[in-house]
Image: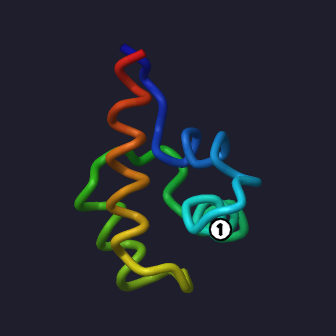
Amino acid sequence: MKDYSFYQFALTVRGRPDAKGKLAEQIFDDLSFPKHESDFHSLSDYIETEASISEPMSVFDDLYEEYQEWLKF
């Protein structure tokens, strides 16, 4: 099992021509994003209260689920 933060995973998604790619780009551009965090609730709270992310939270939920699968391999 991999031991990478959500931010590190998001970097692998940058450039995709979909909503997840847009979210990853916005995460990359957010200099205050918690780069070492992997906890869903901490990340979700940050995005909802601190970040200026324009994508819906459902996109984050889907991307986090993909992150969980990615960690397994």
Question: What amino acid type should be assigned to the residue bearing mark 1?
Answer: Lys
Whether 67 is drawn above or below 53: the answer is above
Whether 51 is drawn above or below 17: the answer is below
39 horizontally vs 47: left or right: left
Q: Residue furthest left?
A: 41
Q: Position of residue 72 (x, y in %)?
A: 35, 20
Q: Quadrant of residue 33?
A: bottom right
Residue that appears at 36% across and 14% down: 1
Pick the residue in front: 47 or 56.
56
2 horizontally vs 39: left or right: right
69 horizontally vs 24: left or right: left
Which quadrant would the C terminus be assigned to in this image? Answer: top left
Residue that appears at 43% across and 53% down: 63
Residue that appears at 66% across and 40% down: 12
Q: Quadrant of residue 9?
A: top right
Which type of secondary structure does the marked residue at label 1 adopt?
Answer: helix
Residue that appears at 36% across and 75% down: 57
* Count of marks placed on residues: 1
Q: Position of residue 27 (x, y in %)?
A: 61, 64
Whether 39 is drawn above or below 27: the answer is above
Q: Position of residue 40 (x, y in %)?
A: 27, 54
Q: Residue furthest right?
A: 15
**Mark 1 surroundings: few (<14), some (14-19) or many (≥20) residues within 10 A:** some
Q: Would you name the residue on which mark 1 appears?
A: 22
